Amino acid sequence: MCRHLAWTGEPRTLAELLLEPEHGLLRQSWAPRRQSHGTVNADGWGVGWYTPARPEPARWRAARPLWAEASLTSVAPHVSSGCVLAAVRSATAGMPGEESACAPFARGRHLLSHNGVVDRSTLPAGAWPLAESVCDSAVLAAHLLAAPDELGERVAAAGAADPGARLNVLLTDGERVLATAWGDTLSVLRTPEGVALASEPFDDDPRWCDVPDRTLVTATPDGVALTPLETT
Ligand code: GLN
């Protein structure tokens, strides 16, 4: 399982979100606290963020551990954004170890991260030509990014088609963040400055709340809504 994170709200630097929190993605890349599948997340990392300059996000991904990205510590304090999506990867057995298999995946102004596993043969064949990689998460991302507003319905359908799937997803258009909890942990932090969604809390702030399994979360800078996902 990978670990992922999204922020929407007042601008934050990539250092503040990824590197500086005591249990942030940097720490989670080698010592996650709530990970039940896999032990470290050393197969790659990625971050996407939005700037006022253009609707499409910037993206930086690499197929090496986050802790080995030497130049990031210098750059991250200088990059700030009101909407950020990031992940560290623990590759599922049999999946390629390449940059294009690392989240976040992108289409147009949308970014998506998948924390979990899915049998690719259960996904619609139409997703394959659009996928950035043959990795299960990339094929799933291509399917979900084809209809971003249908995230809840499509995740529930994918879960019905593959009962063994774990389908924790983060999806954003640069303002709103949609998230699903389906088979793995997800936590939400509401603050006056914005909302964070993460596989696990990045610090010990008592405002973190666990999201129940099989839930769709809709987060904007000033609000969070939880909706149970249909299960069959
Ligand atoms: N299945 C995806 C991959 O191989 C995600 C793995 C994960 O969540 N650890 O990259």
Image (cartoon, rainbow, N blue to C red):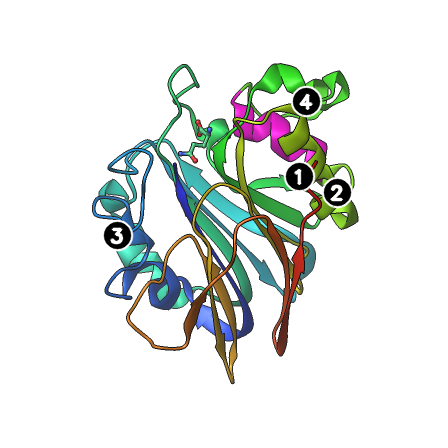
Front residue (pair 17, 50): 17
Q: Is residue 109 magenta?
A: no
Give the number of the disc on residue 153.
2
Magenta part of the protein: which range?
135-144
- The residue that appears at 71% across and 33% down in the rendered structure is 157
Q: Mark 3: which amino acid? A: Arg
Q: Position of residue 90 (x, y in %)?
A: 35, 33
- The residue that appears at 45% across and 44% down in the rendered structure is 184
Rounded to the nearest whole Å, what is the CA distance between mark 2 and mark 3?
Answer: 30 Å
Q: Secondary structure at mark 2?
A: helix
Q: Which residue matches tag 1? A: 155
When the figure is inspected, residue 115 is found, relative to residue 94, above or below; the finding is below
Mark 4, Cα crowd under 10 Å, few <14 / some 14-19 / many 20+, is some
Give the number of the disc on residue 123.
4
Front residue (pair 65, 70): 65
Q: Secondary structure at mark 1?
A: helix
Residue located farthest toward the front when viewing the structure as drawn: 232
